[in-house]
């Protein structure tokens, strides 16, 4: 896919979407070094299509997730599963929140987490997929209505995250520790790249020595 006019902007200069407080970024209960924010911006001069989005993330060690258990809403799987469920004694919680900024020209309709050479269905890398609509910055956010689990990864499905809106907290759990992997946010034919956390594959899950490549993709649904 053609990379269109990538622009790198200091995170402090990015406008915040809606009134959310970006509570995952810098979360005090997250694992040291595993909380932050990734910015994605690109512009297509041929049609004025603009991708302007932020992904906040935090990884929590087993037993450290701070959301209320009653707000943990498991997502129905349109493909893949069943999953064994979140085990607080052994599973890390991977939390993400998507912000579609004011300058974006289209809603985001799905967010995909991939791991190259890693079949999450076969090796139990993912134990649960959920979202939390009640945790701090999730209030007023757009809920995913379902998810898909395939050999390519996890696909969170939305009716559409409009510009200046944000998602609820997107969650999945894994017994595997995190590693920063190259990530790509995609809006139709416009894309940009940064790093986001993804589980380290268990021994034997690596293909041709590739440890794993995490890709987060948000694909727009064109207005109209």
Image: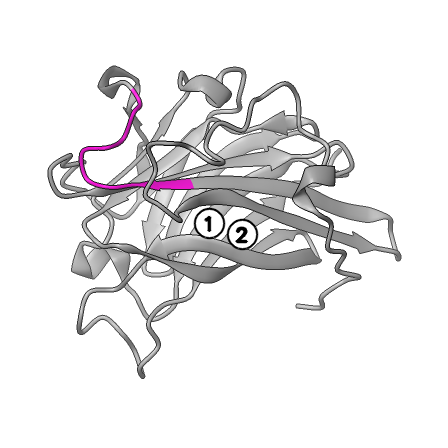
Question: Residue 132: where, in percent of width, then height?
Answer: 37, 24
Q: Residue at x 31, y 81 (%)?
A: 209
Q: Residue at x 49, y 16 (%)?
A: 139
Q: Which of the colour schemes (rainbow, by chain, secondary structure, one colour) is used?
A: one colour
Question: Which residue is tagged 2?
Answer: 217
Q: Report, in whole angstroms, how far the alpha carbon at label 1 lies from the one at label 2.
A: 5 Å
Ranked by sequence position, the earlier of labels 1 and 2 is: 1
Question: Residue 126: where, in percent of width, then height?
Answer: 24, 49
Left or right: 32 as drawn, with respect to 144: left
* Contact, mark 1 vs mark 2 (Cβ under 8 Å): yes
Question: Which residue is tagged 1?
Answer: 112
SS type, badge 2: strand
Residue placed farthest to the left in the image? 89
Mark 1 crowd level (few <14, some 14–19, many ≥20, 10 Å Cα): many
Left or right: 69 as drawn, with respect to 221: left
Nearest the eye: 136 or 122:
136
Residue 189: quadrant of the picture: bottom right
> Residues in magenta?
58-67
Mark 2 crowd level (few <14, some 14–19, many ≥20, 10 Å Cα): many
Nearest the eye: 95 or 28:
28
Question: Residue 143: where, in percent of width, then height?
Answer: 47, 25
In the displayed structure, 103 sits above or below 216; it is above
Nearest the eye: 220 or 180:
180
Membership of 150 in magenta stretch: no
């Amino acid at each position: 896919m053609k990379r269109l006019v990538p622009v790198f902007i200091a995170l402090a200069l990015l406008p915040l979407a809606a009134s959310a407080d970006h509570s995952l970024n810098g979360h005090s209960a997250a694992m040291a070094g595993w909380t932050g924010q990734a910015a994605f911006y690109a512009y297509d001069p041929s049609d004025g299509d603009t991708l302007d989005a932020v992904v906040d993330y935090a990884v929590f060690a087993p037993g450290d997730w701070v959301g209320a258990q009653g707000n943990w809403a498991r997502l129905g799987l349109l493909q893949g599963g069943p999953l064994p469920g979140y085990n607080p004694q052994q599973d890390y919680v991977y939390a993400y929140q998507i912000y579609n900024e004011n300058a974006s020209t289209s809603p985001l309709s799905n967010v995909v987490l991939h791991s190259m050479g890693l079949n999450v269905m076969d090796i139990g890398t993912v134990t649960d997929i959920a979202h939390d609509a009640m945790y701090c910055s999730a209030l007023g956010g757009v809920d995913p209505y379902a998810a898909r689990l395939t050999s390519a990864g996890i696909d969170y499905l939305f009716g559409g995250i409009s510009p200046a809106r944000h998602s609820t907290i997107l969650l999945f759990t894994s017994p595997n520790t995190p590693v920063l992997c190259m990530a790509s946010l995609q809006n139709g034919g416009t894309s940009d790249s940064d790093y986001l956390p993804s589980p380290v594959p268990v021994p034997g899950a690596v293909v041709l020595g590739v440890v794993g490549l995490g890709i987060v993709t948000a694909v727009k649904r064109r207005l109209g």
